Amino acid sequence: MPPGPGTGAPVPGTGTALRHAHWWQRRVVRAGALITLLALSGLVILALVREQTGTEGFLAGLGLAVLPVPLLIAAFRWLDRVEPGPWRNLLFSFAWGACAAALIAIVANSFATRWIAVATADPSSADTLGATVIAPVVEESAKAAAVLLIFLFRRRDFTGIVDGVVIAGVTATGFAFTENILYLGTAFGTDQLNGQSGLTSVTAATFFVRIVMSPFAHPLFTVLTGIGFGIAALSAERHRVRRVLLPIAGLLLAMGMHAAWNGSSSFGPYGFFAVYAAFMVPAFGLLTWLVIWTRQRELGTIRRELPAYAAAGWLTPPEPLLLGSMRARRLAREYAGRHLGKPAARAVAEYEAYATSLAFLRHRGRRGRAGSDFVVRERELLHELWRRKDVARPALAHAAAATAPEVVPPYVLPYGHPQGQVPYGAMPPYGQVPYGGIAPYPAYNPYRS
């Protein structure tokens, strides 16, 4: 039996290696430091915003700013349904955007604008320059830091364009949330001083522009950075220049679109609507199409890569096609939840996620983009699938019957595999057939550059 999860043998990168790590390298220490940093940033940003808006303005801004957040989070989570990333990454991204990035932006923007006003003795031009040049550079860089951190330290969860879009979008949603509290709270305070209310108030106008017309503005800018990181994640490790330049190119595009958006007010009374129609709407449509197209390609990857594991007996013959269908996956989860309860539905969802990760891992390996931990990671994923098969297979069998003739056996073995067809139900016990009884692909070298 090969060493791996559940065998008692140490797996590279865990166990013994961690015991010899310095105290500052331990996961608990790093997680604690990060949580402390975000909590302190949150307290400082809370105090700064409340100081500028007052208590009533802060509460009013908070109540209005929170409205689009659940919708945006749900939209990005929907995009990530093929291979859902862990919630801890989304929580970190949102917290970074709302706390750390917002604090960096407020401090840096205020300092830079003040310095320009003193240096030029022209406060009006300093405000314009700060909004169109300084703010896009500072804010997009601060938001991009969250994407970079997950790309570097949660590389296993960052495998492609959709991951980059989701992480960047959630980070920007958190940033926009804090910024909207500030703008709406300030507008509310202005209305209180002027005695205005209703649809003609500054608060109503600010709410219309920021919450109704452009709730996706900040996510749209930062998603360009996320796409750059996502394409870099798809590139082989030997393409180091490409992996560096692509995220930078995405960040520059994000800064450029952000600058055009902030500068729209200087283009005349209809400048906002001109930029909105000419840039924001087409860009939003294009990016939506790109993400949906990418998701369909991911489903195709599942259908192409998993048959090799079905041939070796790790999956049943219909499963590669079932797992490559969002409808079949949903039906399987619903069936498990309806007949066996929420824990079973969760187990089926995890089975689908691990199978998806396995397909993507094999796909990266065939293209020479897998890391040196390919064998260990493959073994881990197969082990997790095997643990959940008793719950997941009846649910997937129901989905197969419900979606017929979308999923049509018999199963045809791809890649010209010499092993032939494995009879249905002839599933070898975990560990007796190493890595499913198949080489991941011909002559694969996990250390290949």
Image: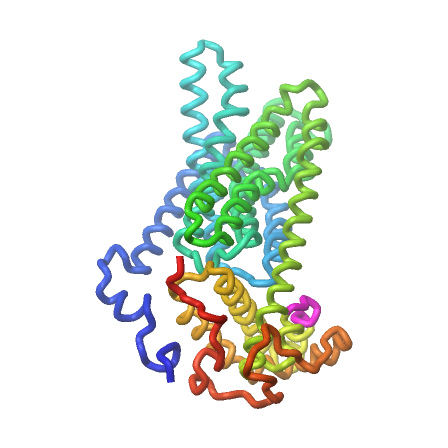
The N terminus: image quadrant: bottom left
Q: Main secondary structure of the magenta part?
A: helix
| Residue placed most toward the observer, 285 or 248 | 248
In the picture as drawn, the residue positioned furthest to the top comes out as: 121
What is the x, y in percent for residue 131? 53, 25
The C terminus: image quadrant: bottom left
Q: Quadrant of residue 110?
A: top left
Magenta span contains residue 156: no
Counting labels gives 0
What is the x, y in percent for residue 42? 42, 43
What is the x, y in percent for residue 181? 55, 37
Q: Residue at x 63, y 69 (%)?
A: 303
Q: Residue at x 55, y 68 (%)?
A: 359
Residue 296's place in the image compared with 219, above or below, is below
What is the x, y in percent for residue 410? 70, 82
> Over which residues does the magenta segment extend?
324-330
Q: Residue at x 43, y 17 (%)?
A: 116
Left or right? Give the position of 118 relative to 334: left
In the picture as drawn, the residue positioned furthest to the right comes out as: 405
